[in-house]
Amino acid sequence: MSPVFLSRLIFDFMAAGLLLFGLSYWWLGNIAHELAGCAMFLLVIAHNIFNRRWYGAIPKARREARGRLNMAVTVLLLAAMLVLLVTSVLISQALSGIMSAYGGFTARQIHALAAYWVLVIVSIHLGLRWPMIMGVARKLIGIAQPNILRTRALRVIAVLVAVHGVWSSFVLAVGTKLSMRTTLDWWNFEESVAGFFVHCVAVAGLYMFLTYHAMTWIHDGKRKNIDNSAHRVQSNG
């Protein structure tokens, strides 16, 4: 495995971790929140530099259903990140002397809305790449041969994470936050800090689970149609 590729993955997961930390504003405090946000955006810029060749492959990707979906998710993620960046500048307390006229309640609402949409879209983004991520994990651990018991255990864990993610979505009121509805239902960090991150990871796991299995279902359906078409051709021949 290339050290550059491994570094890219580490930076990507660091950015995802900083996103989760950024969501815990009422635990971090403003200074730590803004520093985490700045670090995350620097890593996002690095991610785009490392993956600049992907943009050149867009014309080819448009020919395939998976490529079109991947492109749509990437565009949505870029849009959400731009909204997050712009609102970050508008509501930054470090820049309050310059941006105080623009950093009102609405900007803060939009900032929170964009943050939770980024969480969802990043999870879908990872779900589309889950086979590659698992392949990297197998190489790092040194797993060379498939194992039925291990596969079944991982599938059970994935289902449990997805079920937990459904519950966590209600606990964190994710639906309310994704629709920009005003709510006072915020996590009480005085009761539990770890619980918040566990719920966030479970929500991310839910969307990764749904994305991966949706793509598997589409791929299997397409392969079945191809096999049926080939069988009909042979029968007619």
Image: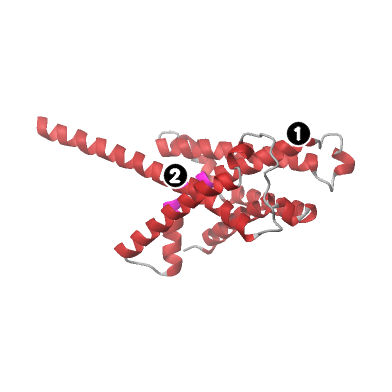
Residue located beneath label 2 in the image: 210
Q: Amino acid at mark 2?
A: Leu
Furthest toward the top, the residue is 236
Q: Residue furthest right?
A: 97
Q: Under tag 2, what secondary structure?
A: helix
CA–CA distance in space, label 2 to label 1 = 32 Å
Q: Residue 91 appears at what percent x and percent y?
A: 79, 41
Answer few, some or many: residues within 10 Å of disc 1's Cα (few below 14, many 20 plus, some between 14 and 19): few
- Give the magenta-colored segment's residue range: 123-132
Q: Give the residue number, with chain letter if any, for mark 1.
A: 106
Above or below — where is 195 with respect to 220?
below
User: Is 106 left or right of 117, judged from the image as shown?
Assistant: right
Q: Provide residue 137's location: percent of width, then percent of height.
A: 45, 62
Residue at 55% x, 45% y: name it.
169
Q: Residue 126 in magenta?
A: yes
Q: Main secondary structure of the magenta part?
A: helix
Q: Is residue 128 above or below residue 15?
A: above
Magenta segment includes 82: no
Circle 2: is it few (<14), some (14-19), or many (20+) Cα within 10 Å? some
**Residue 146 seen in this snapshot:** no
